[in-house]
Image (cartoon, rainbow, N blue to C red):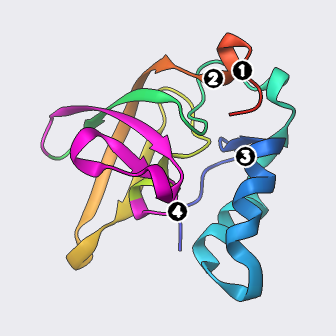
Amino acid sequence: MLPPNNGERRLTELDFTRLSKFTAAGALPQLHDLLDEAEVVPARAIPGDVVTMYAQFVIRDLKLQNRQTLVLCYPADAEPAKGYISVLSPAGMGLIGLPVGAVARWVGPGGVESVAQIEGILFQPEATGDYLT
């Protein structure tokens, strides 16, 4: 189960449609909940400070106080060692759709909770006019 997002989570219509395909046949109930709670907006209307698919962004781990630059991607493109994290991973589902300044929480492998704040968006496809990524 994902923590409440206080209405912060926004998804583009395209991201919503693509992510919905992963919930077919009752798979990934956490993703289903996320999609139910998110505000869905046209790609042209998504604020430039929101984590979208293929956005590059910086997070700060609030427990360890270290920073990481990540790119949120689909599972086929995931390369965690290079900072490309799958949207279907616990971290990916915790971060998608949140704005800069928001705090994301997720439980990773081994039951370890991570808490990270989104510090900045370095690149967002929609902000550059790329609405088809």
Q: Mark 4 points at which residue?
A: 3
Amino acid carrying label 2: it is Pro
Q: How far apart are marks 4 and 3 (CA)?
A: 20 Å
Task: Name above or below for residue 53 compared with residue 110.
Answer: above
Residue 117: x %, y % from top left: 37, 36
Amino acid carrying label 4: it is Pro
Task: Name above or below for residue 78 compared with residue 101.
Answer: below
Q: Mark 3 points at which residue?
A: 15
Residue 101: x %, y % from top left: 46, 28
Would you say the residues marked 1 and 2 are in contact, meaning their CB atoms lie under 8 Å apart? yes
Q: Name the residue under label 1.
A: 130
N-terminal of the two: label 1 or label 2? 2
Q: Which circle marks residue 56 in the picture?
A: none
N-terminal of the two: label 1 or label 4? 4
Q: Is residue 119 left or right of residue 52?
A: left
Q: In this view, does 40 lie to the left or right of 111?
A: right
Mark 1, mark 4: which one is toward the viewer? Answer: 1
N-terminal of the two: label 3 or label 2? 3
Would you say the residues marked 3 and 2 are in contact, meaning their CB atoms lie under 8 Å apart? no
Q: Nearer the viewer, residue 63 or 98?
A: 98
N-terminal of the two: label 4 or label 3? 4
Residues packed near mark 4 inside 10 Å, few (<14), some (14 to 19) or many (20 plus): few
Mark 4, mark 3: which one is toward the viewer? Answer: 3
Amino acid carrying label 1: it is Asp
